[in-house]
Amino acid sequence: MRAHLSDLISTALSRLPGDGQPAPGHLERTRQKSHGDFASNVALLLAKRLGRPPRELATELVAQLPDSPWVARVEIAGPGFINFHLVPAAYQALVPQILHEGRDFGRGRQGGRRILLEFVSANPTGPLHVGHGRGAAYGDAVARILRAAGYAVSCEYYVNDAGRQMDILAISVWMRYLDLCGEQVTLPAKGYRGDYIWDIAAGLHREFGNALQRDSDSVTGSLPADEEQQLDTLIQRARELLGPEYQTVHAAGMEVLVDDIRRDLKEFGVEFDRWFSERSLADSGEVARAAGLLRDNGYLYEKDGAWWFRSTDFGDEKDRVVVRENGQTTYFASDIAYHLDKLERGFDELIDIWGADHHGYIKRVQASLEAMGRDSAAFTVLLVQFAVLYRGREKVSMSTRGGDFVSLRELRQEVGNDAARFFYVLRKCEQHMDFDLDLAKSRSNDNPVYYIQYAHARICSVFRQHAEQSGDPGDLAAADYALLVEPHEMDLLNRLSRFPEVLESAASNREPHQIAYWLQELATDLHTYYNAHQFLVADPRLRAARLGLVEATRRMLASGLELLGVSAPETM
RNA sequence: GCGCCCGUAGCUCAACCGGAUAGAGCAACGGCCUUCUAAGCCGUAGGUUACAGGUUCGAGUCCUGUCGGGCGCACCA
C-alpha cells in the first residue's frame, strides 16, 4: 500500500523538469483522519534545494501524479504536505489477500543478507537470572523478526568455557564436594555459593565417591589474606592436588550448567543454531592466529611482560592486554578470534546483544576488527539495559555472586512464559525497565498479554459458535468485502494494512516492541468492533464478509504473537 | 574525573532515521452484560516533553551546556 503510493510519487518526481533524481522524502501514515491516509513531505524537502515555495512545488507534483484506482483524492495541506485519501476498496482488498497469504502477509522475501546474531552468552557459572531473560527474549524476538523480514539469521550462544571464572566455579564445586566428604573447608567470599553448587558437588560425590577427596590442610591451609589471591592460590592447589582429575571437576560444573541453561532457554522458546565454545578457539589455534594478525599488522607491543593491543589507534581509551604476564591469553583475545571467525564464515553482518554493563567493550572489539583489516561497520552491538524487578512497589534485590537472585526459571514459573516474553519485549532495549511481577502475573484486564490473547480466543469462539449454528464453515472466498463500510471495520482494516510497515520498521531498527504495540492496537480495534457489531448476522453475505475480516485479524494476531514467541490460544 | 544509556500524564511506557492538535495502558471518576467469552466496551479528567540556549519553514526527536538517574572505566569474564 505504502509502496504503491511511493511509486506514484517517484513517477511524478521524474516527470518534473529540473535535476534528475530528487530525494523521495518520507511517506508517512497520518495522525489525523482529516489528513487522509498517507502524507508526503517531498515538496517541503525539495523547497529548500530548489529555492521555491513548497506549496507551489506540491501543486506541480500533484499534477504529475499518475492515476491510481486506490487513490480517492489528493490534497495539499498545511505548509506543503501532500495528503492521499484512499478508496475503501484499497482496504477491503486486504481481507482476501491476508486470507490467501496467511502468515506470509507483510513478510519479506527470503534471500536477504546473512546475519549472525549472538545473544545471551551468559557465563555458565550459574543458572540464568532475570537479566539474562531480557536478553534472551529480546534477542530471540529480533531473530524472528529479521527472519520474517527476509534475512537469513543464524543465532549463536558463545560459551565462556575457558578462563578464570570457570576455574573459580571449579574450585567452588570442589570445596563443596570436600565438605560432603567431611573435610572442614571454607569457601572464600568470592567463590560461587548458590545452592546449585551443592547439587553439582553432590553429583560428583555420587559418581566418584571420595576419589577426589584431599586433605583440607593441603587445600585451604595458610591462604593469603587478599580475596583475589585466595582464589588464585586455590585454583593452583586444585590443579596440583587433583592433577588430571581437575578437568573432571572443571567439566562437571560446566556441563551441568550449560545443559541447564540450554534446557531453560528451550523451555522459554529460545533456541540457538550453534553453541560456540570459547575453548575451541584456543584449542584450534584461532586465538594465536588472530593475535598473529594483530602483531603482523603492527598493533601489538610488549610492556611489563604482557602483550598489548594498541586499540587507542582506533579511538579506544587505553590499550588492552591480549596476553598476560603469566602467558595466559585474556578473554578479550578469545573474543577477537571469535569475531574474526564469525566474519570469515561469510556473514554480511554481525549483531551482538550485550548487557549494558559491557558497553565499554564495544570500542575495543571494533578496534580489533579494524586492526585485522576488517570493516567494523559490519559489526553492531545492541545494548540491553537492566531489568529491575518489582513486586508491587517493592524492589527485588539481585546479586549473582552471592546466589541471591531471581532466576529466569523462577520468573517463568511465577508469571508464565507468555507474560514473561511479552513484558521483556514491551520496552525498547535501551530503556531501563521496571518489571512488575505482580502485574505480569495478574490474570486480569491489567495484563496486556491476556488482552491480546483474549482477542484471538474470542475470534476462535465466534467461529465455534458459527459452526454450531449453521454447521457450515461458510464460503468466505465468495464474500463481498465491499460490504465492510462501518467505521469500526475501516479502523480494523487500516490497522491490518500497517503490518508490513511495522514489521519492516521493527526489523531495520531491531525493535520488537513495535510489534507488541501494534498487536495491542490491533486487539483494541478487534474488541471495539466486537462490542459494537454482531458478526453472526442473518444476512449471509454480510456475515461472510465480517467473518472474513475477523479471520484475517485472527491470523495477523497469531502472526504477530509468533514473532514475539508468545502463544495464540484458541480458548482462555 | 572520563565514557555510554536514559529523563515525556500521578505510575509504567509509545511517538514510524525533523512534520500538522505529543498518544496508550494502569491508577481516579461516570456509564454498558435476557445478544458471538465483561480477561471486554464507551465516556471524563490528567502535559511548559527535566532545565537553559542554539540549528530551521517546523524540534519530544538534531547540537551545546546545566541538573537528575543507571552502568562502565582490570594482566575478571
Image: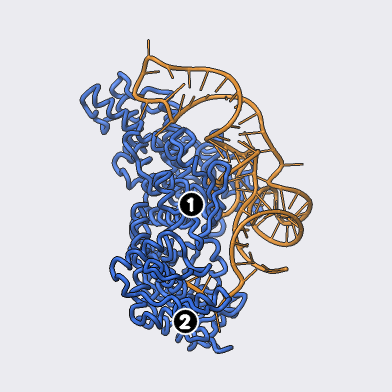
Chain colours: A blue, B orange
Residue at image location 46% in from the left, 56% down from the top: A129
Task: Say whether residue A170 is visible.
Answer: yes
Vertical position of residue A107 compared to residue B5: above or below: above
Q: Residues within 10 Å of mark 2 (few under 14, many from 20)?
A: many
Instruction: Please state the horizontal and vertical placement of residue A280, each as a whole percent of the image.
Output: 36, 76
Label 1 sits on residue:
A10
Residue at image location 54% in from the left, 70% down from the top: A361
In the picture, the quarter occupied by the C terminus of chain A is top left
Q: Specify the subunit that label 1 lies on.
A: A
The residue type indicated by label 2 comes to: Thr
Instruction: Please state the horizontal and vertical placement of residue B18, each as a whole percent of the image.
Output: 60, 51
Vertical position of residue A204 compared to residue B31: above or below: below
Mark 1 in CB contact with mark 2 (< 8 angstroms): no
Name, please, the residue furthest toward the left: A471
Vertical position of residue A149 compared to residue A452: above or below: below
Name the foreground residue: A40 vs A364.
Answer: A364
**What label does residue A329 carry, if any?**
2
Task: Say whether residue A3 is visible.
Answer: no
In the picture, the quarter occupied by the N terminus of chain A is top left
Residue at image location 51% in from the left, 58% down from the top: A384
Q: How many marks?
A: 2
Instruction: Please state the horizontal and vertical placement of residue A539, each as a whole percent of the image.
Output: 30, 20
Name the foreground residue: A228 vs B67.
Answer: A228
Q: Specify the subunit that label 2 lies on.
A: A
Helix, strand or loop at mark 1:
helix
The residue type indicated by label 1 comes to: Ser
